[in-house]
């Protein structure tokens, strides 16, 4: 575990430095959390490129990452320090909530540890899809194409996914390539380290984004709710790609919200685009998400949205290249338009899908402390922002709504038996969007202070100062 | 500053969340009473003795007494695939027969005969139902 953690450090350093460079206004927890996921995304992409051009080795990975770290250190050193101002002096309530957040996070970590100890190879899709592909990638030039080959998993529906994006598998393989532990050893800790980093980073990012855009009180409540969301914690230990995808969805919508607040600051949009691209590099659903996110950015920011497209290029290009060289096709897609249309017109499929989504949200926690119930209680305690503000912020949910629509569309036309497809994946789809939905929900609550709902950005503050002088 | 009744609601939410997290932890502890539900860890242990006897990275044929399709056979194949990766694992008959193959047997039996039916000879029986085969010339 220690070796695997050490191997993750360069990735986190690259991500942290990237965030420091592009969003120096973010506080430490947000920067570290965003940096952790971003770094794993960037280094998984570099790993894939090294494999693709045939120069992958421990030395080439470390040398490439060292070049990036040195380059970012130089760039960050030249960037003026513009850290966020100190948080308001914490009240007793904030200290109590910090303790509660720490408690729920600790219990969630114990839950993760217990599940991993009982099932170190992860759940079904971990050993049959994500981690087995990681082993093929870590095998180097002789075997990596097995990861994108139709022969893997004997071409079985539900197990053979030659076109699935590679962020998670490449992140795990990268650790194995660095530590040299890619054999079938039950002590291999790479998949669990990647899973844990993404889960923790998602909670940290949720706190950081909500604190940045609203108040620490809501940031802490969001962490408490997400770490008490049973299916979110359980899925973390499964070692699937759904929690990493949840991380990138949350990061994208949160950064888009921050970018709008800061007059579409190009670097925030660039960062939002980068993480949207990595959503595509994580799972196929991410491609649908990035498409909707691009349209939403274009609608809201108009010409200022260009940095978002530029940011998204890396992750999307990796995905397109990987899909172009993979062999075989996804077996859940219908063979003809007529067949798809026939399925879409079947009302029983709509009913089954909607019931399944309802059940997926129900599975988020126990009825007596269901996360949606806790959220409703908080809404009762603080009320909602004005109707005008709600209208002004509702667009932030559009990329998530678009993704859910794409999920429903896929279920409608799937070639697989619908009840099997729903039962094996629907809870995971809910978990993918849950952190972003929590972020979205807290945007609608008025911070319990006399200050405006959105604190003015530094740009706005400086322009006000200039106009006064 | 939040109103006093708001603080009570927030406190209740925090306490309920802590107890909910504890409940989820208890569920995880209960599930952990039946570890390795698909046999992936056991497969890694069983195949560990076979791997050093195989040439590195070659694709391997798969011979088993469990049919791929029913859940037990599928789980046996997928856990074996994970255990022997980065070797590709290909059921015999799906593609040109690889030179090397591994047997993954749930029941004791005549492994040599099982291999011979598919044109393979036993190279080594490493125990626990794991057998190394090589295609007959």
Image (cartoon, rainbow, N blue to C red):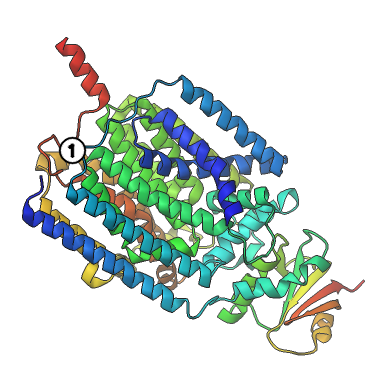
- Please tell me which residue lies in front, B24 or A127: B24
Q: Where is residue A359 in the image (x, y as percent from the top left)?
A: 30, 70
- Residue A339 visible in the current orientation: no
* The quadrant where residue A106 appears: bottom left
- Please tell me which residue lies in front, A170 or A321: A170
Q: Position of residue A206 (x, y in %)?
A: 32, 48
Q: Where is residue B79 in the image (x, y as percent from the top left)?
A: 63, 71
Give the residue furthest to the top.
Answer: A469
Q: Is residue A38 left or right of residue A257?
A: right
* The quadrant where residue A362 appears: bottom left
Residue that appears at 15% across and 43% down: A447
Number of numbered discs:
1
Q: In this view, does B36 lie to the left or right of A265?
A: right
Residue at the disc numbered 1 = A392
Residue that appears at 60% across and 36% down: A65
User: Which image quarter is the C terminus of chain A in?
Assistant: top left
* The quadrant where residue A309 appears: top left
Read off the chain for label 1. Answer: A
Residue that appears at 21% across and 37% down: A88
- Residue A68 visible in the current orientation: yes
- Please tell me which residue lies in front, A423 or A353: A423
Q: Position of residue A242 (x, y in %)?
A: 44, 57
Q: What element carries label 1?
A: helix
Q: Relative to residue B84, is residue A139 depicted above or below?
A: above
User: Which image quarter is the N terminus of chain A in?
Assistant: bottom right
Q: Relative to residue A129, is residue A452 depicted above or below?
A: above
Q: Relative to residue A75, is residue A204 depicted above or below?
A: below
Q: Neighbour class for label 1 at 10 Å: few (<14), some, many (≥20)?
A: few
Q: Relative to residue B127, is residue A370 depicted above or below?
A: above
């Amino acid at each position: 575990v220690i070796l695997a953690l050490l191997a993750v450090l360069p990735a986190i350093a690259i991500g942290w430095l990237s965030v420091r460079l592009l969003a120096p206004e973010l506080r430490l927890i947000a920067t570290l959390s965003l940096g952790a996921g971003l770094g794993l995304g960037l280094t998984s992409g570099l790993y894939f490129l090294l494999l693709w051009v045939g120069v992958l080795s421990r030395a080439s990975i470390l040398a490439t990452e060292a070049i990036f770290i040195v380059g970012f250190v130089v760039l960050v050193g030249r960037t003026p320090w513009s850290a966020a101002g100190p948080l308001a002096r914490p009240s007793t309530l904030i200290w109590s909530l910090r303790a509660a957040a720490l408690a729920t996070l600790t219990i969630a970590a114990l839950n993760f540890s217990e599940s991993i100890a009982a099932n170190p190879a992860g759940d079904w899709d971990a050993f049959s899809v994500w981690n087995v592909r990681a082993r093929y990638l870590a095998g180097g030039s002789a075997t990596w194409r097995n990861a994108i080959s139709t022969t893997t998993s004997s071409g079985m529906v539900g197990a053979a996914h030659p076109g699935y994006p590679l962020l998670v598998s490449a992140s795990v393989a990268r650790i194995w390539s660095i530590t040299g532990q890619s054999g079938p050893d039950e002590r291999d800790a790479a998949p669990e380290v990647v899973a844990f980093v993404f889960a923790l980073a998602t909670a940290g990012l949720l706190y950081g984004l909500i604190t940045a855009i609203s108040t620490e009180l809501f940031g802490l409540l969001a962490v408490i709710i997400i770490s008490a969301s049973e299916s979110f914690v359980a899925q973390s230990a499964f070692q699937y790609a759904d929690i990493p995808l949840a991380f990138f969805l949350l990061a994208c919508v949160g950064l888009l919200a921050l970018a709008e607040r800061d007059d579409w600051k190009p670097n925030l949009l660039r960062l939002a685009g980068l993480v949207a691209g990595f959503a595509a590099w994580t799972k196929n659903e991410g491609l649908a998400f990035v498409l909707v996110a691009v349209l939403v950015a274009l609608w809201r920011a108009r010409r200022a949205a260009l940095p978002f497209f530029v940011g998204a290029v890396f992750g999307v290009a990796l995905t397109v290249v990987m899909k172009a060289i993979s062999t075989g096709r996804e077996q859940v897609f219908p063979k003809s338009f007529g067949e798809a249309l026939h399925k879409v017109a079947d009302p029983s499929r709509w009913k089954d899908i909607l019931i399944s989504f309802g059940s997926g949200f129900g599975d988020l926690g126990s009825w007596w402390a269901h996360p949606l119930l806790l959220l409703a209680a908080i809404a009762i305690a603080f009320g909602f922002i004005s109707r005008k503000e709600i209208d002004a912020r509702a667009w932030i949910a559009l990329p998530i709504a678009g993704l859910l629509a794409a999920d429903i569309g896929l279920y409608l036309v799937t070639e697989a038996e619908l009840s099997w497809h729903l039962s094996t994946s629907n809870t995971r789809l809910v978990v993918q969007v849950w952190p972003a939905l929590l972020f979205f929900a807290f945007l609608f609550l008025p911070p319990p202070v006399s200050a405006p709902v959105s604190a003015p950005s530094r740009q706005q503050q400086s322009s006000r100062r200039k106009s006064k002088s | 500053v939040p109103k006093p009744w708001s603080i009570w609601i927030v406190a209740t939410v925090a306490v309920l969340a802590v107890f909910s997290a504890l409940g989820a932890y208890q569920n995880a502890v209960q599930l952990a009473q039946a570890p390795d539900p698909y046999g992936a860890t056991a497969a890694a242990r069983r195949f560990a003795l076979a791997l050093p006897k195989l040439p590195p990275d070659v694709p391997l044929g798969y011979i088993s007494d469990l049919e791929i399709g029913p859940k037990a056979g599928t789980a046996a194949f997928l856990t074996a695939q994970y255990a022997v990766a980065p070797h590709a694992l290909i059921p015999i008959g799906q593609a040109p027969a690889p030179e090397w193959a591994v047997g993954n047997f749930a029941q004791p039996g005549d492994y040599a005969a099982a291999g011979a039916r598919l044109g393979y000879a036993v190279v080594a029986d490493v125990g626990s139902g794991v057998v190394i085969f090589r295609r007959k010339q």
